[in-house]
Image (spheres, rainbow, N blue to C red):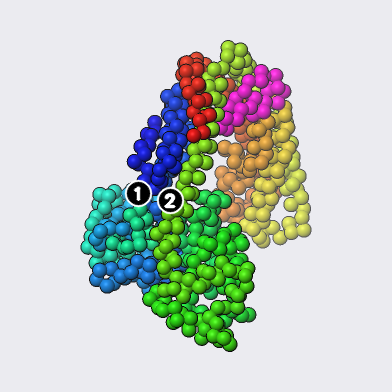
Amino acid sequence: MLNTLETADVRLLEGADRDRIVRQYNRVVEQYNMFQTAFGDEYQDDPELMAAKKSLTKLRRAITREHFQIAFIGKTGVGKSKALNSIIGPSSDGTDPFPSSAGKSITTAVTRLRYAESESLSLHYMDEEQYQKKRDFLCHCTGLSPELSNQELLVKLAEHPAIRSDRGATLADGESINPEDVKALKDLIKTAESRAALINSPPSRDKDFTDRERYVANVVGADTGNSLLWDVRLGMPVDFLTSNVELFDLPGPGAASKVDGWTAKEHLENVHAVLLLANPERIETEVETWLMEQMRSWHGRRRNRRIWLIITRWDNLMEDGLEGSAKMPNPFDSLDQFLERYDMDISRVYMICAAWANASQEAVHQHFAARLRNADNDPLPSRLQSDERAGMRRAFLALFNKGGFPALRELLRNSIATSVRDELIEESRRELGTLRQSLAARFRRACKRATTDDQDVAIAREASSKLQLTLLDIEKEREEFERQAVRLRDELRERFRELWTSAEAHDRFANADEKFRSDTKELESTLAQTVRDEILQTLYHDWRPRFEELPEVELPTVGDESATPLEIWDTHLQSDQEADVTGIPMFPSFLDRTLFVGGHENLVRDLAKGVHYEAMFQEKTRTVAQQAIHSIRSHLLARAGTIERHVRDLVRAENVSRQSDAPCTKLQARMDELEQDAE
């Protein structure tokens, strides 16, 4: 059962909008709970019910947060930490709140900043689930099995070729293994072993604010415990931060270790808004592409309502960078292309430069004028002169006012909160409306299934009885399978004869090992194709009339879909033909070493002892054909048995159906009322 909401639980919405969302949420929760009351454990694994519960839980988490959560993210070295320091200003001791270093990965822990009356620092460590996810991710990055114990992993990491070999190491797909990922996994495991108490530790551990760099910056080692940090939370009396805005400083994807990208992704899905910092020299890199794709997977077409593009570090551009050249694209043309590709509006673009956070308008004017060398000392690049780029020009001119930071602070103080609040209201109403209708429809279908009448039950019983007799009959059938075995053997022998008489055959004994591999692979291909395209088709159709004679009882398949036994039988045929037939349990194969004792490793030895190459394959051809057909026979019997069990389960459900009649009748009226209530 799910709990309803109180108005006081929803802190990010206000007034009538908040009241409306709370009422709608509680009505959908009532629908969900009614379903649970009516059917209990019968539908506990139902995909639609599980999806509805997940959606309600996610929605509740989004609207009951205490703060509007705004994430700063950008490629390593883009100047994210410098930008944050310019936005916030120095701490009480005159130092920057966030450590920064040009071009290097400094932010490794997620840092969260919110308003507080006095400066504070608290550490939040991973729980067991978060630790396991990070451990599994790094195991994948380093090509190691997450099933290994920590001690086994440490042994393998000590000798890992990525750090022990000049040639490095690669994953199965050919991707290179980064030595930094090996070091990150090693540090994580050592930290977990030596400081296990940090996992699932109390919600927060308060520390001295002046020690923040020890936890925020790239300081590793088991003694620090930083590998187990989930986030670092700072409190500061920052004037422009309202009490319900919280800033996230996320590690930049594209750093040395992939774990930074993983950390960013784990937090990004749950924040309300994202400020993507980009370099004007190259606005779209693999990091920007990665982020836009991630946001689309989470929010679909509404992605752009949650993203603002912040272009920074304008002081680095010379004339070529501002006007463009053969070697360097014009940043304003690149920006146009980015906005068009991702269907973003120019109003979501801001331009800042930390070097000018305290500079005068005249200083910024002279900076651009000197680089552009315009005759009239104009600081405006030529690409911004046209009326078509009025919005882009306004964003650029904001740089002349303290490096664009007053406009960015206003965005953080008011604009984002307003935009996010509107988006939360719209998303919540749309999601709750969809859930309201889908739960009502699911309830009606469940009631319909639960109230199966006597005639339907009788049909199901008849089908079950006939299927049991059919299974007994086809269990005894062997003659047709023997014919198929002979047919398969003849096809395989004919194919081998073609191989045996080929132009390369005269040299087979000089290259026995290589020839063995080639012939085995060729016969394996013939075996699979013949079974898939001919024999399965024949045998399935030989049995098909038996299923045509069965009563057309509707059996549940996937979700709420249903099909008759005949339709399911035809679906099995299609599935087996599309699949690799060697996937049939115990299906014999020319590649199976038990059919060639010792496999190719002992082939030369066997030939030397007088085993004739052709005779050996002829014998194995007979064995494979016979066992293949035997395996298919068992497989088809299992397929038929599965259908029979489905019918038997339908009959057995009769008692459950009768017990469910009462709650369906009693609750349907209320469910209909809730579905129609769009308020």
Q: Left or right? Give the position of 103 relative to 207.
A: right
Q: Is residue 384 visible?
A: yes
Looking at the picture, how far across and down is residue 38, in whole percent?
A: 45, 23
- The quadrant holding residue 376 is bottom right
Looking at the picture, how far across and down is residue 282, in whole percent?
A: 54, 71
State the separation of the CA atoms marked 1 and 2: 13 Å
Tell me which amino acid carries mark 2.
Answer: Asn
Which secondary structure, mark 2?
loop
The residue at 41%/74% (across/down) is 402
Specify the quadrant that holds the N terminus: top left
Residue labelled with disc 2:
270
Q: Left or right? Give the position of 338 relative to 192.
A: right
Looking at the picture, how far across and down is residue 60, in whole percent?
A: 41, 41
Which secondary structure, mark 1?
loop
Q: Residue 143 magenta-drawn?
A: no
Specify few, some or many for label 2: CA neighbours under 10 Å numbering under 14, 14-19, or 20 or more: some
The residue at 44%/39% (across/down) is 21
Q: Nearer the viewer, residue 180 or 529?
A: 180
Residue range in magenta is 544-568
Above/below status of 36 relative to 389: above
Q: Residue 548 magenta-drawn?
A: yes
Mark whose residue sits in front, 1 or 2? 1
The residue at 39%/59% (across/down) is 413
Tell me which amino acid carries mark 1.
Answer: Glu
Q: Nearer the viewer, residue 394 or 90?
A: 394
Looking at the picture, how far across and down is residue 496, in whole percent?
A: 73, 48
Residue labelled with disc 1:
66
Q: How many marks?
A: 2
- The quadrant holding residue 19 is top left
